[in-house]
């Protein structure tokens, strides 16, 4: 519901009254015609609203009145509208067009620039850039009710849209250079803006620095700048290119040198790696080949590495790596018999501080077996010098310990041998005096049978004592054999029977009737048989039976004994003891090998050495029970005539005797005189040389010299023979001794002697040696 009021038009919608049409003037009447058009009568004219636009009509706009009265609008039956007001009554017929609107056009009255020049332009104007401040003054042809007129403007080229004009003036300042067009429009309030407008075009010149000449200069300057820049850049590029080429060249050279150095380092590294690999292989090979057990522990005292020998010593095959060392290695101190733990810091410190100390310990292995070892060790450090483990070395010294014990025993035996040799020497000297004097007395009193019988008994007793000293010398001398032509049957029987004294062992001898003789050292053959028989007796606990056989063998080229073809005498010693286990048969002749805890392991080794020095072989036979050893010695083609009694050969000649025993000198002088020789005796070598020289100067040189080998307190036989033969090469010297050092009597001719007389000797032996020597031609 629309309501007119003095304050304007209002609408009531049943709840509230609100103003409409935004009219701030008194509204006297509101009327809607048949076409739905609203007609609003106000104090300032008539307004028409067709729902789209609202137009105002007054006198200037073709309406005859200025103000309408209250409730003064009426529509008749024909549709004509009647409007009443202060000025009268106005009729609008239905067919009549709406009141014609007056079209307004604004006028550009004046144009004021920055220098206050007034223009009334009719054509476009050009302003300098200094006059870019422009003011426009506009006007309309309406002189009354100007409040109903409004104007708008826009400066094309500067404004984006039209702006409402308050007043008559429009001002623009600091217009940039460019082409502009000022556009202005005018209308009455509530009219649409007309299509036409007042227009004025002008142009603002740019400043000098933005003029075409300036831009041309700018272009030339820019071109010059670009050219200079390009030249500078090209120059810089050339310089940089040269620098880059230099740097590239230097870099290439550096790379070449680095490459050469890298290649050298690669070669050196390859060489080092190859050497390291070789060293590792050598170390592995060395560890495998070492006879010592090597164990390496990690910092936690677990087994990190060990070699094959260590596994053998421990009695292990695997499962040791990574185990705590004290659970694998069990040692006992040989002095305190207390356990030695390899993880003990005290033990490690002891080995480090005293590396020269060789710690002996018993290594207790599998099944309780014990091995004597030397324990040594040293710490292991990493590249930074920090401890990274410990290295232990276990050396099996069982054999070495036995060798030391045997060496000590051998030294004692050597001392005993020296003592025995000395005793035999002195005893033989005494026997020589006894035997010689007994024989002299026997020849002197041969017409007295009873006395001759007693003297013969003394001589036989001396001969028996001589056999005992021969046995003593056999144990004392050793070394190279002093070979002589022997019949083995009596030698073997004597040696076996001698070795069975004090036992319950029985013996049986079986020899071929025509057993050849051999060239051998009786004492050493005696020693071989002693060892064989003693071993058999010990194996049979000194009770049992031994069978000794002797026979002749003729060996072909391929005989299985590694002996030359020919005739050999075989001596076989069999027993009925437990025999030798198969696993030990290959070791019986090894030095220091023994199956007895107290054994030296030298007996059979000595037998093997002695038989080899005689050009023969000793072997262990294959038998069903017991043990059997066979000795093979080359048979001699010579046959020795058995002499029941050797006759004394008398002769003549001048003999020089050199012996340190007065009894020997006096007895030998009487024996020589008894068998036809003259003699002179001295006590030592320098006297012998002087006596020989004096006899030669007197024209009565000695025909032969009998020289003792061992002289106490003077020149012995070895020194004297050398000096004597150097001065008198034609001298004939016979060596005699109750004892000799190694090899002396076996090679007496190498020293220059022409004969040998072992003490004690019989008159018959002396006469035969003198006869043989004197029958030889002079050495001159």
Image: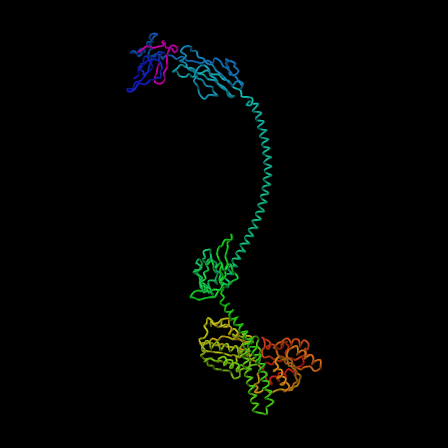
- On whether residue 55 falls in the magenta region, the answer is yes
* Residue at point 58%, 47% (across, down): 257
Magenta extent? 47-70
* Residue at point 53%, 55% (across, down): 276
- On whether residue 423 falls in the magenta region, the answer is no
**Which is nearer the eye, 745 or 345?**
345
**Which is nearer the eye, 612 or 670?**
670
* Residue at point 59%, 39% (across, down): 243
Can you say whether 304 is above or below 735 in the image? above
Q: Is residue 310 visible?
A: yes
Can you say whether 259 is above or below 418 in the image? above
Q: Count how many numbered circles sit on residues in the image.
A: 0
730 relative position to 600: left or right: right
**Which is nearer the eye, 537 or 196?**
537
Q: What colouring does the structure picture have? A: rainbow
725 relative position to 210: left or right: right
Where residue 550 sits: x, y (%)?
51, 81
Where residue 697 sits: x, y (%)?
71, 80
Where residue 520 sits: x, y (%)?
56, 79
Displayed quadrant of residue 248: top right
Where residue 123 sits: x, y (%)?
51, 15
Q: Quadrant of the C terminus?
A: bottom right
156 relative position to 264: left or right: left
**Residue farthest along the right direction in this orientation:** 698
**Residue farthest along the left direction in this orientation:** 14
Q: Quadrant of the N terminus?
A: top left
Q: Is residue 520 visible?
A: no
Can you say whether 230 is above or below 342 in the image? above
Can you say whether 179 is above or below 506 in the image? above
């Amino acid at each position: 519901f629309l309501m007119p009021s003095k304050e304007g038009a209002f609408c009531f919608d049943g709840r509230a009254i609100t103003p409409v049409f935004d009219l701030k003037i008194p509204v006297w009447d509101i009327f809607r015609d048949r076409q739905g058009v609203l007609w609003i009568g106000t104090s300032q004219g008539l307004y028409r609203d067709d729902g789209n636009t609202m137009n105002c009509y007054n006198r200037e706009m073709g309406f005859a009145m200025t103000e309408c009265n209250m409730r003064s609008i009426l529509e008749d039956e024909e549709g004509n509208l009647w409007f009443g007001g202060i000025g009268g009554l106005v009729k609008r017929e239905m067919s009549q067009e709406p009141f014609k609107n007056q079209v307004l056009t604004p006028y550009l009255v004046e144009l004021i620039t920055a220098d206050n020049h007034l223009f009334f332009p009719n054509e476009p104007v050009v302003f300098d850039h200094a006059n870019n401040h422009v003011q426009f003054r506009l006007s309309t042809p309406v002189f009354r009710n100007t409040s109903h007129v409004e104007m708008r403007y826009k400066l094309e080229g500067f404004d984006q849209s039209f702006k409402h004009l308050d007043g008559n003036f429009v001002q623009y300042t600091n217009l940039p250079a460019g082409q502009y067009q000022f556009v202005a429009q005018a209308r009455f309030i509530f009219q649409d803006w007309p299509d036409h407008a007042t227009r004025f075009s002008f142009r603002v010149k740019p400043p000098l620095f933005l003029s075409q000449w300036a831009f041309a200069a700018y272009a030339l300057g820019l071109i010059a700048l670009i050219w200079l820049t390009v030249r500078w850049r090209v120059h810089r590029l050339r310089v940089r290119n040269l620098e880059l080429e230099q740097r590239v060249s230097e870099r290439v050279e550096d790379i070449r040198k680095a490459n050469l150095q890298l290649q050298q380092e690669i070669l050196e590294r390859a060489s080092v790696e190859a050497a390291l690999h070789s060293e590792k292989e050598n170390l592995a090979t060395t560890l495998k080949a070492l006879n010592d057990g090597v164990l390496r522990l990690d910092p936690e005292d677990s087994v990190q590495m060990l070699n094959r020998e260590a596994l053998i010593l421990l009695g292990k095959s695997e499962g040791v790596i990574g185990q705590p060392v004290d659970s694998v290695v069990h040692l006992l101190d040989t002095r305190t018999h207390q356990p030695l733990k390899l993880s003990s810091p005290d033990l490690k410190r002891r080995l480090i501080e005293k590396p020269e100390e060789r710690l002996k310990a018993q290594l207790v292995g599998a099944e309780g077996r014990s091995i004597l070892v030397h324990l040594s060790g040293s710490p292991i450090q990493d590249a930074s010098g920090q401890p990274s483990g410990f290295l232990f070395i276990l050396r099996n010294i069982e054999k070495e310990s036995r060798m030391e014990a045997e060496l000590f025993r051998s030294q004692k035996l050597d001392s005993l041998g020296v003592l025995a040799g000395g005793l035999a020497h002195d005893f033989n000297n005494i026997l020589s005096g006894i035997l010689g004097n007994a024989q002299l007395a026997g020849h002197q009193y041969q017409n007295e049978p009873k006395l001759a019988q007693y003297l013969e008994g003394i001589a036989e007793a001396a001969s028996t004592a001589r056999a005992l000293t021969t046995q003593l010398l056999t144990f004392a001398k050793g070394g190279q054999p002093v070979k002589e032509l022997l019949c083995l049957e009596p030698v073997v029987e004597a040696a076996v029977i001698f070795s069975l004294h004090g036992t319950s062992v029985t013996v049986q001898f079986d020899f071929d009737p025509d057993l050849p003789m051999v060239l051998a050292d009786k004492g050493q053959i005696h020693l071989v048989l002693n060892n064989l028989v003693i071993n058999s007796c010990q194996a049979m606990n000194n009770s049992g039976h031994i069978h000794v056989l002797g026979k002749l063998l003729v060996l072909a080229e391929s005989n299985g004994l590694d002996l030359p073809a020919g005739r050999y005498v075989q001596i076989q010693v069999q027993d009925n003891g437990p025999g030798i286990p198969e696993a030990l048969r290959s070791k019986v002749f090894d030095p220091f090998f023994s199956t007895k805890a107290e054994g030296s392991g030298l007996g059979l080794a000595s037998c093997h050495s002695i038989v080899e020095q005689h050009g023969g072989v000793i072997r262990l036979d294959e038998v069903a029970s017991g043990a059997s050893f066979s000795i093979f010695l080359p048979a001699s083609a010579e046959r020795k005539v058995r002499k029941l009694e050797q006759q004394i050969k008398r002769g003549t000649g001048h003999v020089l005797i050199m012996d340190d025993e007065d009894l020997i000198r006096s007895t030998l002088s009487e024996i020589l005189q008894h068998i036809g020789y003259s003699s002179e005796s001295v006590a030592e070598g320098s006297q012998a040389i002087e006596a020989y020289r004096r006899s030669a100067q007197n024209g009565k040189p000695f025909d032969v010299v009998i020289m003792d080998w061992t002289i106490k307190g003077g020149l012995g036989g070895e020194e004297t023979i050398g000096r004597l033969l150097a001065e008198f090469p034609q001298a004939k010297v016979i060596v005699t001794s109750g004892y000799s050092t190694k090899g002396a009597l076996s090679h007496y001719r190498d020293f220059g002697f022409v004969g040998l007389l072992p003490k004690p000797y019989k008159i018959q032996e002396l006469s035969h040696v003198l006869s043989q020597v004197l029958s030889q031609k002079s050495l001159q």
